[in-house]
Image: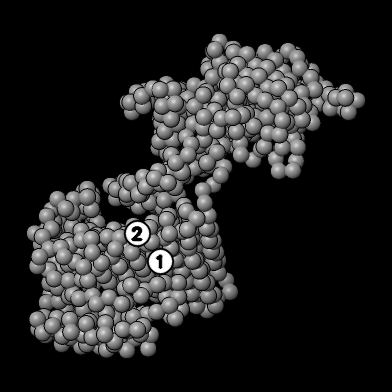
Amino acid sequence: MAHGAGGDRVTTAYLEDFESLTRTAGTRSDWLQLLRQSALERFRESGFPSSKDEDWRFNNLAPLTGTDFRLAATEGATIRPEDLRPYLFAIPGVSTLVFVNGRFAPALSNPATSRPGVTVRNLASAFAAHGDLLHRHLAQHATLEKGGFAALNTAFIKDGLFVHVGRGADAGPPVHAVFVTGGRADGAATHPRNFILVEPGGRAAVMESYIGLASGTYLTNAVTEAVVEQGGYLEHIKIQRESEQAFHVGTTHLHQGQDSRSESFSVSFGGAICRNNLDMVLDGPGVDSQLFGMYMGRGRQEMDNHTSILHAHPNCSTREIYKGILDGRSHGIFNGKIYVTPEAQKTDAKQTNRALLLSDTARIDTKPQLEIFADDVKCTHGATVGSLDPLATFYLKSRGIGGVRARKILTYAFAAEVLEEIPHPSVRQELEAVVMSRLEGLGAE
Amino acid sequence: MLEIINLHARAGDKQILNGINLSVKAGEVHAVMGPNGSGKSTLAQVLAGHPAYEVTEGQVTYLGQDLLDLEPEERAQAGVFLAFQYPVEIPGVSNAYFLRAALNEIRKARGEEEIDPIDFMDLVEEKLALVDWGPEIFARAVNAGFSGGEKKRNEILQMAVLQPKLAILDETDSGLDIDALRIVAGGVNQLRRPENATIVVTHYQRLLNYIIPDRVHVLAGGRIVKSGGKELALELEAKGYEWLTEPAVTA
């Protein structure tokens, strides 16, 4: 339907990979095989989206959809622990699970000792012990309707992070899943699939890092499904530091039950095209969610954030702040959908989206989309696009800080306002350092 | 130290300064007073190089240099400091980072090395006492969420650390209660040196009870209409500004 030219050819490549994957994977569980098969059918029908699709109208996906991405080979990618060191965080008690080209890499991982009621492992190994649970949840939350990417990911479900926090349990220090694409990755695709379940009253903190140690054009097509049941809490941090030639499409689906809370952070630096979807369903009254996003684009990067929040019950509040810094000829896209059903009275939804354009050739398309069908609600949105505040610039100059230095400090400050909200100092500092080093490029102008 | 000759300036189409003449010598404190709209804040901001104002005529010489020819940051590096009437909030940048960056830029301009981080902390701790603050202020972002009084104290703290040759205080007393006023004035007085000069811009005589000026100037309609000693401030307090701003007097 939305096939571009050559769409059929590309689909054929994915089909071949699908067949070889299912041959080698065997038929562990019938339901999983059926799920993959139906997802593949779905992908075959829909193909990749194009700019004719409302949700993709600002994107130029041709470079992505026109490439034959084949499943990344796990062999041949030799990643050494020291290669990963810059991407890991010194958080006391952190559990680190590393995935190389889509497969769990135990030798590079460092899981913490397990806590009562908490299971943290790789998804491929969870099907045996947690099959029923996965059967109940997998692909029930992240819908296959949207574009072809989630369907494609589902067709290729293989490995990723699995976190299960039982009733009233506390997962303690964060779990950090690191998805590395390395080796000869040109034309390679990975489809990481993560699943997080926090049962009533449970607590978890999960970080996902997507990093590129390969310089070629590769595709990461990730899906995370997270379910937070009544009174539970989830902190979710996604850090995208792919190669700047890579394509990253990631969907995080967060399903929240009554009186649950969540804080989500999405920080993106890499990718030639980066598309983050954050879909939240507030499936009970009294939910409280905070969504923070920060992205930087340079060169010809396309940095796209789509968030969607469904307020379906009364007394829920969401606060969303997304900030972008765009330099060079980069292109930012922000689409923030807030849907309030007639039942969702006393909804308090606040959305802020700001972009800083550092060059005349950088641009942003921004579209807040509030659809409100309840009458007793407080919904606000604000979008600003601009350059540095001249008054703040003068203030710095009046203290002797001029030119490029002043621009760097103020740009850094713009990003830091979001990064400051991250509750782990080592993560915050590392990300602030990345922002700083990216800003070093400003001096070249 | 500072020689202002026939200074005219405007903001957009609005002419605000209409020929200011003022001479400030090292070691002196000058008060610039005047009613609202007289141009006194504009004068302060023009000296610091605020981009909203355009100088249309006249000249300003500072330590033998053409001040108006310098960028705002070059003026600061040459020792000019403006304490803002409305200090700017910069969320995301800590006071410590900001102040160290400023000090290092100024040192660099003077051909000195960057300050050692430990020496910097020592320097700052000493200056914090001047404004009666503890070190916790350092982790906070620049002026973000500060009360009006805290912002003014922060200006004085910055001034104390940066040690300007010419300090210009733009209505630093406005919005301060009496305790904050004492702290701010005390900070200014402790920084007085024979080789430095200060221009205090104020609407009220109150601040001048604490910072005793050598000269007092009254601005009206963008000109200095009267100059005198410190007793002029008291006269203004008693009589108001009207007797000086009547057209018959200024003509």
Question: On what subunit does the disc labeled 1 rest?
Answer: A
Q: Which kind of residue does numbered mark 1 sit on?
A: Asn
Q: Chain of mark 2?
A: A
Q: Is residue B158 above or below residue A376?
A: above
The answer to whether the residues at label 2 and label 1 have Cβ atoms under 8 Å apart is: yes
Task: Report helix, strand or loop for mark 1.
Answer: strand
- Which residue is found at the position 27% from the left and 89% from the top? A41
Q: Work out whether residue B131 can be spotted.
A: no
Q: Amino acid at mark 2?
A: Ser
Q: Which residue does the numbered mark 2 point to in the structure image? A: A268
Label 1 sits on residue: A305
Residue sitting at x 55%, y 33%: B71
| Residue A375 percent coordinates (x, y) | 58, 74
Q: Residue B73 in the image: x percent, y percent?
A: 51, 32
Q: Position of residue B172 (x, y in %)?
A: 62, 29
Residue B163 versus residue A73 in the image, above or below: above
